[in-house]
Structures are given as C-alpha cells and as structure tokens.
Amino acid sequence: MKLPIIAPLAASILPIGSSALCLLPSDAKTLSTNFGKLISNYSNKLANQTLTPDFVDHSESVNTLIDSGGSAPQALLGNTFSSRAQFEAASAAQPAEPFTVKNMWYNCDTITVRWESDQTPEPVVGISVLHTKFTAQLQNPSLFQIDEVWADGAWLVNLGTFKPASTKKEKREVVFEA
C-alpha cells in the first residue's frame, strides 16, 4: 500500500517551520520541462501527468488567435482553457511547435519559465507563470501538478495577428514608471 509513505515523504519536503508543501528543485525542473513538451511533443499521457483535472490557462495570445480565427468570440482576459480536458482537446489538434525552456525560477508553489520557440520569421521568446499544487500522484514524475498558467502575447507577431509599429531590428528601450 502506498499511503504509509506519503506522510514521511511529505514531511521531507516541508520547509523548516512550515506546514506548506513546497516544490523541490527536481519538481520545478520536471514540471517546467514537461510544460515545454506539452507544446513541442504533446501527448494526453504527459498532460495527465503534468496538469490537474481542474487546470486553467490564461493566455491573451491564444485568446486573440481564437477570437480572430475561430467560430466564436473569445474574451481577451477570459480563461483560454477551463479544464485539462479542454486543453487536451485543443492541443491534440495542433501541430508541434519548437519550444525550449531557457530559464526557470521557482518558489514554494510557483514556477516562472522563460522560453523560446525558434520560429520564422522571428524566434518567439516569452514568459509563462505556472502555479502548482501538491497532488501526491505517486505514479507521476512529480508529486506536484500545474493547476494554472499565465502567458503573454508573444506568438502574435509571427502569426501576423499583431503588426508592430516599428519593424526595425534594433533593441527597443522600455521605460517603466511607477
């Protein structure tokens, strides 16, 4: 029976003085790698191992693509997918895209991934934030699964949906004001 090992295992990943279960470096690496594979080499098996059944995706770029080419309107700030089943149905119908995780940072329950998709005419670089939860699925490569993703609109330029005002290749300076 697998249940007796969960308590000692859970205790081993608790930060000192904490009751919250936290990601280990191996969990963060596995989940960020699997996140990339869901785009570059999708399978339902990998989605089931990586995403919770109540997984939610918030992606403005995908929402814009659905809205501009789909049969029904999609709210820009609405959920892209409201469940793992919706994500699986849409992902299984899409071609694989080149996708490489360039950097990964994590804390107790969140992973931030900087990624690159080597496409034409320009490579796409983006950042996605993956919220996780402890699920104790012992058959999975990690005891955590991703339950939410937030992403940006980086794909839109290559797909021709968004046309930037400047087509110059030089670095653009961005100033942030508080």
Image: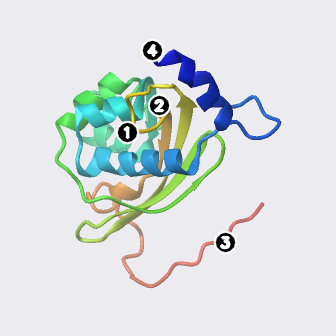
Q: How crowded is mark 4: few (under 14 residues within 10 Å), some or many (20 or more)?
A: few
Q: Do the residues labelled 4 and 3 touch (CB within 8 Å)?
A: no
Which of 70 and 44 lies nearest the eye of the viewer? 44
Q: Which residue lies furthest to the right in this view?
A: 17
Q: Quick one: label 3, few (<14), some, or many (20+) residues within 10 Å?
A: few
The residue wearing badge 4 is 1
Q: Residue at x 65, y 47 (%)?
A: 107
Q: Give the image location of residue 74, x and y in percent.
A: 37, 31
Numbered badge on residue 78:
2
Instruction: Check disc 3 and report its element: helix, strand or loop.
Output: loop
Please name the amino acid that badge 3 sits on. Val
Q: Earlier in the sequence, mark 4 or mark 1?
A: 4
Specify the label residue 63 is tagged with: 1
Among numbered discs 2 and 1, the one appearing first in the sequence: 1
User: Alpha carbon of mark 3 to alpha carbon of mark 1: how far?
Assistant: 27 Å
Q: Do the residues labelled 4 and 1 touch (CB within 8 Å)?
A: no
User: On the image, numbered disc 3 is attached to which residue?
Assistant: 175
Three-letter code for the amino acid on which mark 4 is drawn? Met
SS for callout 1: helix
Q: Which of marks 2 and 4 is nearer the N terminus?
A: 4
Q: Nearer the viewer, residue 1 or 14?
A: 1
Q: Name the front one of labels 4 and 1.
A: 4
Asked whether the beta carbons under mark 3 and mark 1 sit within 8 Å of each other, the answer is: no
